[in-house]
Image (cartoon, rainbow, N blue to C red):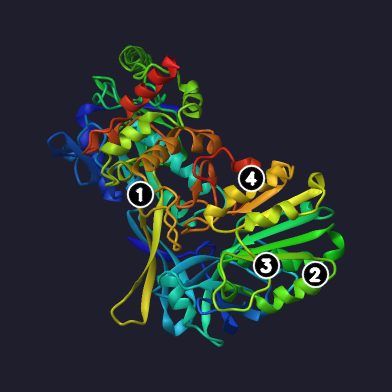
C-alpha cells in the first residue's frame, strides 16, 4: 500500500483560533473563532461548520453569528457528548480545526421584502441567532419581523443581553415563553411555544416562517402556522441529524432522498412533509 | 473496438505474465461454495466459475478502513490529508459487480468529490468476466438488468467453450493485450459463438420477481406503510452483514486514533452500517431510525427509491449477497415479491 499527500481533500481542516470563550449558562458555552490571516468564513445564516479536535474527533456545529460580522464567527455548544465536553474545556488562545461552512442555510435573498416570523425552541435559538442578527443588521430590507422564543426555565435562556436588545428595538416584535419557572423572577409568559403563535399578527401570504427547535417541536408549531394560513412553501425548518462527513456521502444524516448536511439543514416544509421520519 | 480471443491453454500463461508486471486480484475458491477476491500468482488459483464473492470488489475501491488525515501535535490543529492506494489489476469481475463499481463511481464523483476514492479508482484496471449461467437462487440480476456487460471495464472475457472471447474496451486494456502477446484476432466464427451464448442467456436469465424494472420506484412509492417492514424488523438482528456485503453500500464512519506517543495520530474512516442502532442517533439522545423495521425499510429504499431519485440509477445490482449472507433469512427477492403481491391485492 502506498500513501501520498492529497492537496485538495475536503477533509483538510483550517486552523481556527479561539479569540473569546465564555459560559452563557451552566451548560452552554460560546466561542468566538478567527481563521488564519483573519479570513472570513463566508457563511450563510443557518449553515454549519465541522469543528475538530485531534484525537477526539469532529462534530457538526451551527454557526450562531451573522455573516455581517466578517472578521470572526461564533459557535455555541452544550456539553452533551464526548466531543462537546472536550470542546467546552477550551479557552481563549486555544485552537480548533474547522471545515466548512456546509449545507444550505436560510435563503436570505428570498426572504427579503417579506414579513419574517422566527420561532426558536430550546437550543434552536443558536442557529436561528445567525438569521436574527442578519435580519437586524439589514433591517430595512425586510417587512415586519417577529421573534418567538421558548425555553425550559428563565435561567436556561441564552444570549440574555442580545434578547434584551431585540426587545428594545421598535422594529422587532419579540415574545418569549418558558415551560416553567423556578425561583427566578419572571413576568413573561408561561407555557409551550405553540401558545404564542395564535397571537401573531402578520399577513400570511407574504410571511416566511422559520422554525428551529428540538425534533418534537416541529409538528406542533407547524400545525399552528398552517392554521394561520401561512403557505407550506413559506415555512422553513432547520433539521438536526447525525453527521460525519458534511459532504453528502457518509449516509448518517439521510432523510428520504435528501442528505441533511448537503441539501439541508434548512428545508422548506413542502419538501419534506411527506418524508418518513423527517418531522 | 477491438475483439480478440485467448485460447484456454494459454490462460495460465496470460495470468503468469500479467502477475510479472502487476498485482493481480481474482476470485479464489474458499470452500463450501464461498469465494473471495484476493491476490493470485497463477491462473490455477483462479475460480473461473464462481458465485458472487463474500465481499464485493468495493473493498479495493473503498477499503474497510483507511487513513484520511494524519496529525502531529507539533503542527498545532493542523492535519495532512493523505490517500492510501495501490495499483492493481482486478480480474474476473462479473457484470453485477461492474454495475456496483459504476454506482460507487457516481456517488464519489458527485460534488463535493471524494478524492480518496477517485485517486484509488484510477489505479485499478478492471477485467470483466461474463456469467454464462445463473449463480444461484438468490440472484436477481435478471430483474436489475445486469446480466450483460454494459461498460465499466478495460477488458471483458467471455468463455465461448473453445476459447475466451476478449473485448478490448479502453486504451489501458489495449496496453495489457499489447504487452502480453498471447491473444489472437477474433474471427466471424467466434462472434457467432458469442451471439449464440447471449441468445441462450436470454432464455436462462429471466425477471425473477414479476415486476418490470421501470415499475420498481412506483412500487416503493406505494409501500412506505407496508406491513412487510414490521415483519422484517421482527426478524432482523441488526448485524449489518447485508450492508457490508452489498456492492453499492458506501456509508462510513470517521474516527480519530491517537498513537501511543500521545502526540501523533490519524483520522480514519471505516465502513458503517445503517442497520446499526446508533447510526442515526444524535448527541442529544434522539434516534431518527430507532426501530429495526425503520432501518430495514431505509436499506431497501436506498436501493430502490431514494438513490434512484437522486442519481437516476438503481442501487441494487441483483448480486444476491444480502440474501445469501443474512442469518435471519431475510431475502431481497422474497421482500420484493411480497410488496408486489400486496400491491396487486390493493
Q: Are marks 2 and 1 in contact (CB under 8 Å)?
A: no
Comparing labels 1 and 4, the label whose residue is closer to the camera: 4
**Subunit ID for the residue under disc 1:** B
* Front position in the image: B63 or B213: B213
Q: Is residue B108 left or right of residue A47?
A: left
**Subunit ID for the residue under disc 3:** A
Q: Position of residue A97 (x, y in %)?
A: 52, 74
**Residue B93 visible at all:** no
State the separation of the CA atoms marked 2 and 4: 30 Å
What residue is shown with label 4? A223
State the separation of the CA atoms marked 1 and 4: 34 Å
State the separation of the CA atoms marked 2 and 1: 44 Å
Vertical arrangement, residue B293 with respect to residue B188, above or below? below
Comparing labels 2 and 4, the label whose residue is closer to the camera: 4
Q: Secondary structure at mark 4?
A: helix
What residue is shown with label 3? A129
What residue is shown with label 2? A137
Amino acid at each position: 500500500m502506498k500513501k501520498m499527500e492529497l492537496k485538495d481533500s475536503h477533509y483538510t481542516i483550517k486552523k481556527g483560533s479561539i479569540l473569546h470563550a465564555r459560559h452563557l449558562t451552566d451548560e452552554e458555552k460560546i466561542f468566538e473563532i478567527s481563521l488564519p490571516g483573519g479570513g472570513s468564513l463566508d457563511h450563510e445564516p443557518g449553515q454549519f461548520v465541522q469543528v475538530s479536535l485531534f484525537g477526539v474527533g469532529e462534530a457538526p456545529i451551527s454557526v450562531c453569528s451573522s455573516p455581517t460580522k466578517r472578521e470572526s464567527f461564533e459557535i455555541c455548544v452544550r456539553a452533551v457528548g464526548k466531543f462537546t465536553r472536550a470542546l467546552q474545556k477550551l479557552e481563549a488562545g486555544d485552537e480548533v480545526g474547522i471545515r466548512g461552512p456546509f449545507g444550505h442555510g436560510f435563503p436570505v435573498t428570498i426572504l427579503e421584502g417579506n414579513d419574517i416570523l422566527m420561532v426558536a425552541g430550546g437550543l434552536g435559538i443558536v442557529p436561528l441567532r445567525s438569521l436574527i442578527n442578519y435580519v437586524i443588521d439589514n433591517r430595512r430590507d425586510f417587512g415586519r419581523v417577529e421573534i418567538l422564543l421558548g425555553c425550559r426555565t428563565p435561567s436556561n435562556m441564552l444570549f440574555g443581553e442580545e434578547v434584551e436588545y431585540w426587545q428594545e428595538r421598535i422594529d422587532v416584535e419579540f415574545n418569549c415563553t418558558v415551560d416553567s419557572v423556578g425561583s427566578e423572577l419572571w413576568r413573561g409568559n408561561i407555557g409551550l411555544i405553540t401558545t404564542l403563535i395564535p397571537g401573531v399578527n402578520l399577513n400570511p401570504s407574504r410571511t416566511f416562517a422559520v422554525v428551529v427547535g428540538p425534533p418534537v417541536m416541529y409538528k406542533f408549531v407547524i400545525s399552528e402556522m398552517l392554521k394561520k394560513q401561512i403557505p407550506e412553501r413559506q415555512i422553513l425548518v432547520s433539521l438536526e441529524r447525525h453527521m460525519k462527513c458534511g459532504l453528502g456521502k457518509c449516509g448518517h444524516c439521510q432523510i428520504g432522498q435528501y442528505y441533511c448536511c448537503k441539501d439541508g439543514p434548512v428545508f422548506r416544509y413542502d419538501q419534506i412533509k411527506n418524508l418518513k421520519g423527517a418531522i | 473496438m477491438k475483439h480478440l480471443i485467448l485460447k484456454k491453454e494459454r490462460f495460465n500463461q496470460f495470468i503468469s505474465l500479467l502477475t510479472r508486471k502487476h498485482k493481480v486480484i481474482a476470485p479464489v475458491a474458499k470452500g463450501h461454495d464461498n469465494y473471495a477476491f484476493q491476490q493470485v500468482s497463477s491462473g490455477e488459483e483462479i475460480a473461473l466459475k464462481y458465485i458472487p464473492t463474500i465481499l464485493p470488489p468495493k473493498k479495493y475501491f473503498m477499503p474497510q478502513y483507511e487513513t484520511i488525515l494524519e496529525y502531529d501535535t507539533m503542527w498545532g490543529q493542523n492535519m495532512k490529508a493523505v490517500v492510501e492506494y495501490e495499483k492493481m489489476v482486478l480480474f474476473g469481475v462479473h457484470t453485477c459487480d461492474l454495475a456496483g463499481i459504476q454506482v460507487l463511481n457516481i456517488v464519489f464523483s458527485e460534488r463535493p468529490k471524494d478524492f480518496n476514492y477517485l485517486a484509488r479508482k484510477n489505479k485499478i484496471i478492471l477485467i470483466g468476466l461474463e456469467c454464462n449461467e445463473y449463480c444461484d437462487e438468490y440472484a436477481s440480476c435478471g430483474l436489475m438488468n445486469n446480466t450483460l456487460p454494459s461498460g465499466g471495464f478495460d477488458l471483458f472475457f467471455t468463455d465461448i467453450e473453445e476459447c475466451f472471447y476478449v473485448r478490448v474496451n479502453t486504451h489501458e486494456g489495449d496496453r495489457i493485450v499489447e504487452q502480453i502477446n498471447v491473444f489472437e484476432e477474433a474471427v466471424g466464427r467466434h462472434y457467432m459463438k458469442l451471439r449464440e451464448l447471449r441468445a441462450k442467456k436470454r432464455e436462462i436469465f429471466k425477471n425473477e420477481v414479476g415486476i418490470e424494472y421501470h415499475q420498481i420506484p412506483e412500487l416503493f412509492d406505494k409501500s412506505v406503510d407496508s406491513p412487510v417492514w414490521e415483519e422484517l424488523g421482527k426478524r432482523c438482528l441488526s448485524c449489518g452483514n447485508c450492508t457490508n456485503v452489498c456492492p453499492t453500500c458506501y456509508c462510513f464512519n470517521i474516527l480519530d486514533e491517537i498513537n501511543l506517543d500521545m502526540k501523533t495520530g490519524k483520522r480514519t474512516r471505516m465502513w458503517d452500517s445503517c442497520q446499526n442502532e446508533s447510526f442515526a442517533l444524535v448527541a442529544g439522545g434522539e434516534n431518527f431510525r430507532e426501530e429495526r423495521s425503520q432501518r430495514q425499510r431505509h436499506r431497501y429504499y436506498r436501493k430502490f427509491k431514494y438513490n434512484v431519485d437522486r442519481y437516476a440509477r438503481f442501487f441494487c445490482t441483483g448480486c444476491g449477497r444480502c440474501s445469501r449472507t443474512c442469518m435471519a433469512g431475510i431475502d431481497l427477492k422474497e421482500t420484493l415479491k411480497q410488496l408486489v403481491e400486496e400491491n396487486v391485492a390493493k
